[in-house]
Image (tube, coloured by chain):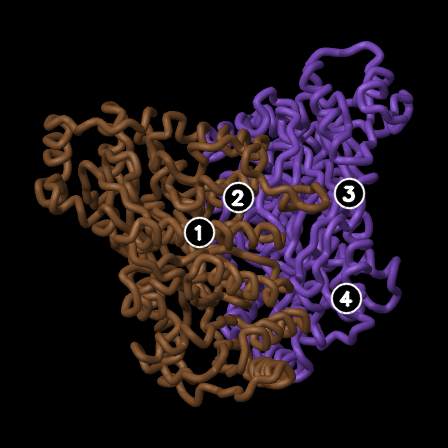
Chain colours: A brown, B purple
Amino acid sequence: MNPQRLPLSPAIIHEMKRLLGVSNVLEKSEDLILYEYDGSVEKGRPDLVVFPHTTAEVSQIVRTASRHQIPIVGRGAGTGLSGGALARSGGLMIVFARMNKILEIDIPNRRAVVQPGVVNLDITRAVEHAGLYFAPDPSSQKSCTIGGNVAENAGGPHTLAYGVTSNHIAALEIVLPDGEVARIGSVQGDPTGYDLCGLFVGSEGTLALVTEITVKLSRTAEAVKTLLGVFESIDDACEAVVEITARGITPAACEMVDGWTLQVIEDYIHAGFPRDSGAVLLLEVEGLREAVEDQAAAIDDVCRKCRAREVRLAKDNRERDLLWKGRKNAFGAMGRLAPSNYVLDGVIPRSKLPVALRRIREIGKQYGFQIGNIFHAGDGNLHPLVLYDPRDQRQFEQAIAAAENILRMCLELGGALTGEHGVGMEKNELMPLLFSDADFALMRRVHDAYNPDSSLNPGKVFPLSKGCGEIRIKKADGSGVMV
Amino acid sequence: MTLTANLGSRLTDAIGTHNVVSAPEELAANAVDGIVPQVIVCPTSAEQVVEVVRFALAEKLAVQAFGSRSKCEIGMPPGACDILLDMTHLRQVAHYDAGDLTLSVDAGLPLRELAGFLEQHGQFLPLAVPCFESTTAGGAVVSGIDSALRQQYGSVRDFLIGAEFVDGTGQLCRSGGRVVKNVTGYDLHKMLIGSLGTLGVVTRVNFRTFPLPAACGACLAGFADPHGALAFRAAVELRALPLADLEIFSPAASEILCAILDRTHASISNWIPRGIWSVYASYEGNQPVVTRTGEELQRSANENGARACSMLPKSTDEPIGGMLREAYEWLRWASPATVLHRIALPQLTAAVLEELLRITDTLRLRSCLLIRAAGVVYFSVFADSDNELSWNALADAAGPVREFAAANRGHSTILHAPLAVKKRVASSRMALPDEPLQQRLKQAFDPANLFAPGRIVGGI
C-alpha cells in the first residue's frame, strides 16, 4: 500500500459511525491530537480513531479500511517507547482500550483468556487470590495493555528470570489485513506445526491485529527478598553484576540506577535511595525460603567484594514496594528536569557491562548531555536516558545522534538494538546495522505473506531510506555483528 | 522434482569438495521413509550449504538435512528427497561467553560433546532430549522433540536466542542474536523449532546456558490409579517446588521400562513399582532446598494415597532418569509395530486418560502412556506383528486418537509409525487448524518448496 497521505472520505467516517456508534469514533482535530504521541520521541497523527468492542467489529473495520486502502495502526494505552502505536502514514487508528474484558480464568491450568485492552497489572490482580500472577512487568504495567505487550514483546525487570511476553503467551486470536479472523498457537502451549505465536508476538502490529490472548500464569514464589547494593561508583556496581552472572546466581531481577538518576528519583519519590552514592543495584531473589536465603547471602557477598559500601535488605513489603516504586517511576521523575527525555533500549552481553557504561559516559560528554542510566543490568538491557528540549532543534538532533552512537556501541559489543521496546519507527533506519540484505529479504517475505499491502502499521520495523549495505557495521573480524 | 544425471560429480564441481557420497549402497542405507536420495553431501561450512541449496534450487531438487539421524522419522514421509545434507561435519563451538551465559554452536555439534564442554565451566544446556548421546544441537531444535527438563527450564523456544540458516532462496540468514534479551526484528529462529527441516537448513544455533545446580535429588512414587498420580502431581505443582523433571507413566510403560533396565542395570528395576501408576520427580537447588523438596514430595505422596514412595540414590536415579529422558526411543521399539502419538492437552484428568486408553482397548490393541511436563502425553500403541493387518489396525486407531485430542481442546501428532501407517495417515490429510497461515510461512521461507516437502502433517 502506498503510504502517501490522503484525506479520509466522509463516507468512510459515516460507515465507521454506523458500525460502531458515534461515541466510538473520533474525527475532530482536537481529539486526534491526543493520539499523535506515545512514549517515544516520535509523532504521527491518525485521520480517524475508532474504538471497537468485539472481534467482529475489528474484522469489519479492517474490511472497510482494506476496501478503501486506508492504513491501519493498532494501539493500546500508547505507552510504547518506539513509536509502534503511532499513525506514521495517517489513516485509521484502532484503539483497543474498550476491548478490556478478562474472558476466562482457568486456575488449575494456569491460563487466562483476555481481550487486548486489558491492563497488564489487572491480569495479576484478577488471579493473585489463587497465588498466580502474569510475569512480564513493564514499568508501565499499571497502564499499558496486554495487546501492546504482545505487539512489542514487552519485558520488565522480572523478565530476567521469567522471560519476556513471548514466553508467557499460549495462543492468539488475530485479524488479518483482509479482515479474516484466525486462531494461532494452542491453549496447552505447544502448537502443531510452526510456532506462529512465536512469530506474531513481537511483530509490532505489522502482521495482524490481536483481538484475544491466552496468557500463561505463573505461580507466586514462596519467599522473596529485595536487596539494595549501594556502591561508590558505577564501575563497582557493574563489576558486581558481572560477578553475580558469572557465579551462576540467578536473581529474579537485577536493576541498576546511577548516582545522578538516584538523586532525581529521590527528590520526586522519596523511595529511600541514598543520594550520595555512585550507583545502586536493586536485586530481588525469589523461590523456596532455603533458596532465597542462600542467594541473598551470595549476592551480599558479591556486592561487598565489589566494594559496596552497604547492602540493605528490604525489611518488609512496604519498604520493598517503595524501592520498586522508585525504580518504576524513574522516567516520570525525569520530567522534572527537562521538557523531554529520550529512553534508549540497547542490549549488550552482560560481561561487557563495565565497558558499555564507560562508553555511554564518553558519548554523553561528546554531545554535551548528562545521560542517566536506570536499567535491567541483569540481562544487559540498557536504558540510557537523554534529557533534551524538543523545542531546540539542534539539541533534538544532537540527542538523536548521541542515541544512535550508543546503539552502535551496543552492536559493536555483540548486542542488539532493542531488548523490550521494539523497533517501531524509532530504530527502523538502524536495522541494517544488524541485519543483512538476505535477512531483510526473508523478513520482508514473511511480512508480505500476512500483510502484503503493508496496510497494517506501515513504515515500522523495516528501514525506509538507506540501502542495507550502506550503513552496516563491519566488525574487525569481518563477521558482521551477530551470530 | 526432476531426476538429474551425474548429480554427484556435478555437485562435487559446484561446491569444490570431495565430501559427496553417491555410492548406491550408501544411498540405499540412508533412505528417508523409503525414499533413496540421489546424493549425500557433507558440507564443512555454511558457505558450502549455501552452494548446495543454490544448486538444488537451480536443478529443482528436494533437500533434507540431517544430523545424527536419530529423529529423522518424526513427521510424515517427504514427497521427495534428492539431496541429503549430512550436517555432522559442522561441529564447532563458534562463540562462548561464560560470563554472559551465552553460546553459539554449529548445528552438527553433538549435545553430549557440548555438555562436556559446558560442564568444564559449571554450566549446561537444559536440552535433555532422547538419543542424547548422538543428537546434534541443530537436530534437537529442528525436531522439536521434548526435553525431559521442561518442567523447570521450559522448551527450547525459551532458551534459543538466535540462529543462522540457509533459506529456500539459497541465502544465509540470521535471526535473533547472542544476547539473552532481544526483540529486534521478527523472531524467525523460533520458526525453525519443530520445523522438521521444512523451512531451511540450520547451520548454527545460539543458546542461553544455565549454571549447573549445586545439588539434585529424585523420587519415585506409585499410585493405584491415574487419579492418585495426577492428584500428587497437582499437589506438588501447587507448592512451586523446584522440579526439573516430572513424569507419570502407566503400568504398561513401567513393564517396558523394567524389562530394558533388567538388561542394562540388573537390580535397578526393583525400585520401579509394578502394576500401578508411577510418578518420577527430579529436583535441584542448594542442599537445603533439595532436602526439603524430597521431604515435601514424600509427604505429598503419602497424603495422596501413594502405595510406594522411594527417594532414589544417585546411582539409581541416573539410569532411571536417563531412561525416562529416552522414552521416545523405547516407547517406539517396544513391539514389532508401534505408533507413538504425542498428544498435547490443556487439561489432564483421570477420566481423560481413561478415555484415551479405551480407544485402544476397543480396537484390541495394547498401549501405554507417559505424561511429561506441560500436559504432553506420549501414547504408544502396539501391534504384535509387523504386517499389513497390524498396520491397518494401528492406522485405524490414529483417527480416534486425533479426534480425542481435538475434543479435549488439544492436538496430536505422530512421532513414530511404520511407513505404511504414516502413508495412510498422510493421505487422510489431517488439516492443521491454522494451516493456511502455516502454508504462507513455508512459502515465505522456501518459495520453491525445496526443503523436506510434505514432512509436516497437512502436506507442508
Dividing the picture into quarters, in which one does residue B82 lie? Answer: top right
Callout 2: chain = B
Percent coordinates x, y for residue A154 in the rendering: 42, 55
A406 left or right of B10 in image: left
Q: Quadrant of the C terminus of chain B?
A: top right
Percent coordinates x, y for residue B133 in the rendering: 82, 52
Q: Which residue is mark 4?
A: B121
Callout 1: chain = A
A411 left or right of A188 in image: right
Q: Are marks 2 and 3 on the same chain?
A: yes
- Dot 4 or dot 2: first in sequence order is 4
Q: Quadrant of the N terminus of chain B?
A: top right
Q: Are marks 2 and 1 on the same chain?
A: no
Callout 3: chain = B
Q: Which residue is mark 2?
A: B187
- Disc 1/disc 3 C-alpha distance (Å): 31 Å
Q: Which residue is mark 3?
A: B108
Disc 4 is placed on an element classified as loop
Residue drawn at (66%, 26%), measured in percent from left and top?
B170
Dividing the picture into quarters, in which one does residue A19 lie? Answer: top left
Looking at the picture, which amino acid does disc 2 mark? Asp
- Disc 4/disc 3 C-alpha distance (Å): 21 Å
Q: Are marks 2 and 1 in contact (CB under 8 Å)?
A: yes
Dividing the picture into quarters, in which one does residue A341 lie? Answer: bottom left
